[in-house]
């Protein structure tokens, strides 16, 4: 009981510190345009801001959607830090998921909270370091980073990242994975053939992540209620361990062996 | 002061902001490490998490640096450095920076900076407002039915991964070049499967630690020959 109370207070403090740091970071980030105004004695061109209003509105929606989608995945500390440091879908979320998977901790537990927060913190620090070094040595690095031969490699980080992750997650959770994967493939392939390009995909992804999440939760719930995902936890004498763990494929294993993943 | 997108004072401001946010990351890292030790987690697991996260981050971070270089031609270095180090995402910053074709004066510069910053307002404040409520909701789901709680989290991850799986195929209608991301995806997936097989056959545990970074690097590198073939 005492330990539970202590855990709650640690969690409460995480939220408190997260909010304080978040507010300080937001104030500093927002100050940049206004400090630039003061330094150069310039005023805002409201025509330009007006032109950008549509883009801003779109990303306000994306921001709201990301909050509801990624917050449950990242844990308390990871959420506050991840949303301040950004690059969530292309770096922080996959990094946290990979580390939780490798450490063999179960999502939603305090161990997962620790691993998720640590991985996002380290990822943020390393990103800052890489970018600082990049900025310092920009004149040396620009010819390499802008090399036309290397450009396709830098353009394909997301496919390279999610290819590896998909094998791990789909092989372990194929029952839950099948329907959303088929749906998303259909949506993106059809939209690409209709428009004859890839521009729509970049816009669609912001919307399709929450759609994919909601659809997957819905379909998993139906399968769970029908007993297709193994024993139910809301019935008398039910086992408490999720069944999906028995579905391991050839993907690398976590440190706690059978306790990895979900 | 005369307008200069690469003025030393702008570098100083950005440096201070990034230093404070790095301090936040260090604060949470130390705090969570200590918490892990306190609740009885193996220090080796915690140390390995640090190493894995660091290795995992390098390739994606270099691609973010490419974004800074691309944006710096239009906006100078400090602003893209700030925007891509904190909250920002490359896709948004490129679109937001497109509100003017060429930045010629300070007024245009601060306006573009405002658009790039203001687009992230919801991402800055909503997690601060709703983070606690969402986490408490997750705890309730877990307390009510632990088995469903596990499946719920899996469904969250799978929903995101399925969306990005679809995204990879989002350019196939544009012709042969649109298949490059698909091929990169499969190369990365095959490398991951091979890592799994190698781990099973040899028992080399280090493979487990670096499988995903290896997949990312090989996958990215494979895009170069694929581009020569299909691009």
Image (tube, grey):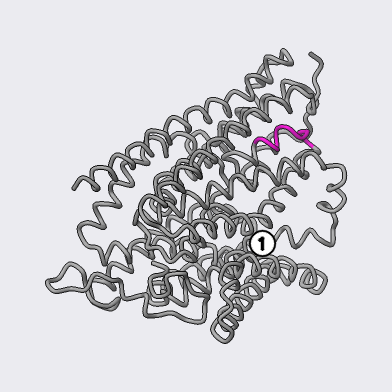
Most foreground residue, B138 or B160: B138
Does the stretch in magenta take in B76?
yes
Extreme left residue here?
A236
Query: Dominant secondary structure of the magenta stretch?
Result: helix
On the rendered structure, is A17 left or right of A202? left
> In the rendered image, which quarter contains the C terminus of chain B?
bottom right
Tell me what residue is drawn at x 66 percent, y 35 percent: B82
> In the rendered image, which quarter contains the N terminus of chain B?
top right
Residue assigned mark 1: A197
Q: Where B106 sits versus A252, above or below?
A: above
Most foreground residue, B71 or A31: A31
**Percent of width and height locating residue A155:** 71, 58
On the rendered structure, is B217 left or right of A209? right
Does the stretch in magenta take in A242?
no
Numbered range of the magenta stretch: B74-82
**Percent of width and height locating residue B62:** 72, 52
């Amino acid at each position: 009981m005492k330990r539970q109370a202590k855990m709650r207070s640690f969690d409460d403090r995480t939220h408190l510190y997260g909010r304080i740091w978040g507010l300080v970071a937001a104030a500093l980030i927002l100050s940049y345009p206004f400090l630039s105004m003061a330094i150069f004695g310039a005023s805002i061109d409201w025509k330009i801001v007006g032109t950008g209003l549509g883009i801003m509105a779109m990303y306000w929606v994306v921001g709201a959607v990301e909050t509801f989608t990624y917050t449950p995945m990242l844990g308390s500390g990871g959420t506050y830090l991840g949303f301040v440091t950004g690059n969530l879908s292309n770096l922080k979320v996959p990094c946290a998921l990979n580390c939780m998977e490798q450490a063999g901790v179960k999502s939603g537990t305090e161990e997962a909270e620790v691993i998720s927060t640590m991985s996002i913190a380290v990822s943020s620090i390393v990103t800052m370091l890489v970018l600082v070094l990049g900025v310092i040595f920009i004149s040396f690095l620009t010819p390499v980073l802008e090399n036309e031969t290397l450009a396709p490699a830098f353009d394909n980080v997301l496919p390279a990242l999610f290819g590896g992750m998909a094998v791990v997650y789909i092989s372990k959770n194929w029952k839950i994975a099948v329907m959303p994967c088929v749906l998303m493939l259909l949506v993106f392939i059809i939209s690409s053939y209709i428009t004859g390009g890839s521009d729509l995909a970049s816009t669609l992804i912001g919307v399709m992540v929450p759609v994919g999440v909601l659809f997957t939760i819905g379909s998993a719930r139906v399968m769970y209620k029908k007993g297709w995902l193994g024993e139910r936890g809301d019935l008398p004498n039910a086992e408490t361990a999720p069944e999906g763990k028995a579905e391991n494929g050839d993907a690398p294993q976590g440190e706690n062996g059978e306790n990895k993943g979900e | 002061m005369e307008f200069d997108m690469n003025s030393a004072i702008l570098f100083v401001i950005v440096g201070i902001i990034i230093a404070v946010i790095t301090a936040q990351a260090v604060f949470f890292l130390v705090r969570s490490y200590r918490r892990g030790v306190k609740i009885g987690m193996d220090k080796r697991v915690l140390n390995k998490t640090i190493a894995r996260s660091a290795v995992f981050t390098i390739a994606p971070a270099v691609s973010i640096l490419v974004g800074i270089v691309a944006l710096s031609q239009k906006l100078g270095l400090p602003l893209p450095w700030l925007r891509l180090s904190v909250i920002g995402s490359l896709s948004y910053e490129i679109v937001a920076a497109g509100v003017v074709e060429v930045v010629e004066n300070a007024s245009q510069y601060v306006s573009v900076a405002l658009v790039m910053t203001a687009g992230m307002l919801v991402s800055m404040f909503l997690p601060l407002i709703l983070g606690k409520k969402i986490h408490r909701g997750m705890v309730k789901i877990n307390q009510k039915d632990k088995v469903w709680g596990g499946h719920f989290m899996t469904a969250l991850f799978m929903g995101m991964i399925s969306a990005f799986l679809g995204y990879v195929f989002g350019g196939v209608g544009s012709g042969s070049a649109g298949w490059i991301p698909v091929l990169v995806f499969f190369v990365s997936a095959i490398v991951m499967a091979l890592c799994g097989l190698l781990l099973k056959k040899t028992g080399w545990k280090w493979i487990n630690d670096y499988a995903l970074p290896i997949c990312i690097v090989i996958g990215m590198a494979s895009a170069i020959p694929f581009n020569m073939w299909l691009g």
